[in-house]
Amino acid sequence: MSQPLDVKVPLLEFSDVHAHYGPVEALRAVNVHIHEGEIVSLIGANGAGKTTLLSSIFGAPRASSGRILHRGEDISQAPTNRISRRGIALVPEGRQIYQEMTVEENMMMGTTPIGMDHFAEDRAAMFELFPRLKERRNQMAGTMSGGEQQMLAIARAMMARPELILFDEPSLGLAPLVVKRVFEVLSEIAAMGKTIFLVEQNANHALRLSQRAYVMVNGKIHLSGESAALLDNEDVRKAYLGLH
Ligand SMILES: Nc1ncnc2c1ncn2[C@@H]1O[C@H](COP(=O)(O)OP(=O)(O)OP(=O)(O)O)[C@@H](O)[C@H]1O
Ligand SMILES: [Mg+2]
């Protein structure tokens, strides 16, 4: 039977997901959903399991129980390359750019899930969004500043034409002005019609950008709701915003 029209299937959904590193349970009964067109953030302290949640989408680690659904289809056992071909891209923690490759070569690597057919067009769009990358197109990526490397990591992910982009702490270790630019870029990418799932320790910025948010503690979703309400939540303000 087809779905009733008023029930929207999330673009991505975690349903009661558990995941382990050996004997250690890193995700505990996680329920998270992201609808098409949303910006959703996930905040939580060091070691809470935020990166694990993102990498479990690509099967590392795999969910030991529960389901990860993309457009209602269980992808929890699908091969990693299949996941990226479904239009999901990750901007990984610590950027993870190819240091010994040029800016352009890094962008080429980003096309892996879709091939090179749109390379020239998409490179031009990314050079417009990130003029610094255009200036530095033939430079070794490892010689650029942290902010430039972050922009490159974002451009590389965009080269796969994803509909959902997962950002793992894109502002970490960057100077305040660069952090501001990263969050502007996230808004611009959302305005291009992309769905964004944003992991951040910078809860203040993340909650201001996103519509909804989840708070993770020890592998569990501890709180969730509209970002504006979480910004006003006393627990969240004390624990993540340094306010009282
Ligand atoms: N490859 C691994 N093998 C074993 N344990 C791991 C591995 N990666 C992470 N862990 C453990 O799983 C838990 C969750 O780690 P994870 O990296 O997902 O947290 P995080 O919220 O992303 O933290 P951070 O803010 O520091 O990036 C931690 O206790 C961590 O030590
Ligand atoms: Mg992490």
Image (cartoon, helix red, strand yellow):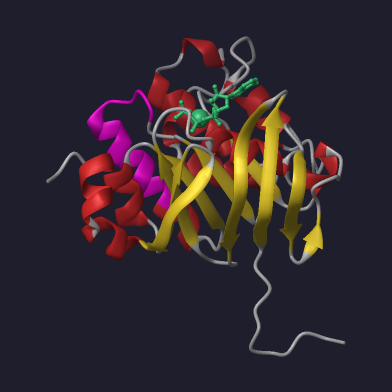
- The residue under the point 42% across, 30% down is 132
Query: Does residue 8 appear left or right of residue 213 in this picture?
Result: right
Whether the magenta-drawn stretch holds residue 205 is answered as: no
The answer to whether residue 92 is visible is yes
Residue 65, percent across and down? 76, 47
Q: How many marks?
A: 0
Q: Residue at x 56, y 37 (%)?
A: 155
Position of the N terminus, as image quadrant, is bottom right
Give me the residue at 54% from left, 16% from top. 141
Residue found at x 40% / y 54%:
187
Question: Residue 91: image x %, image y %?
Answer: 57, 36
Q: Toward the viewer: 129 or 210? A: 210
**Residue 175 shown in magenta:** yes
**Main SS class of the magenta portion in the image:** helix
Q: Is residue 139 visible?
A: no
Q: Is residue 101 above or below residue 169?
A: above
> 237 and 113: which one is in front?
237
Range covered by the magenta-colored residues: 172-186
Q: Is residue 143 left or right of residue 21?
A: left
Ligand 1 sits in quadrant: top right
Residue placed farthest to the left in the image? 244
In terms of depth relative to the viewer, which is nearer, 92 or 242? 242
Outermost residue on the front side: it is 23
Residue 34, given in percent of the width and then of the height, sits at 57, 62
Q: Nearer the viewer, residue 174 or 169?
A: 169
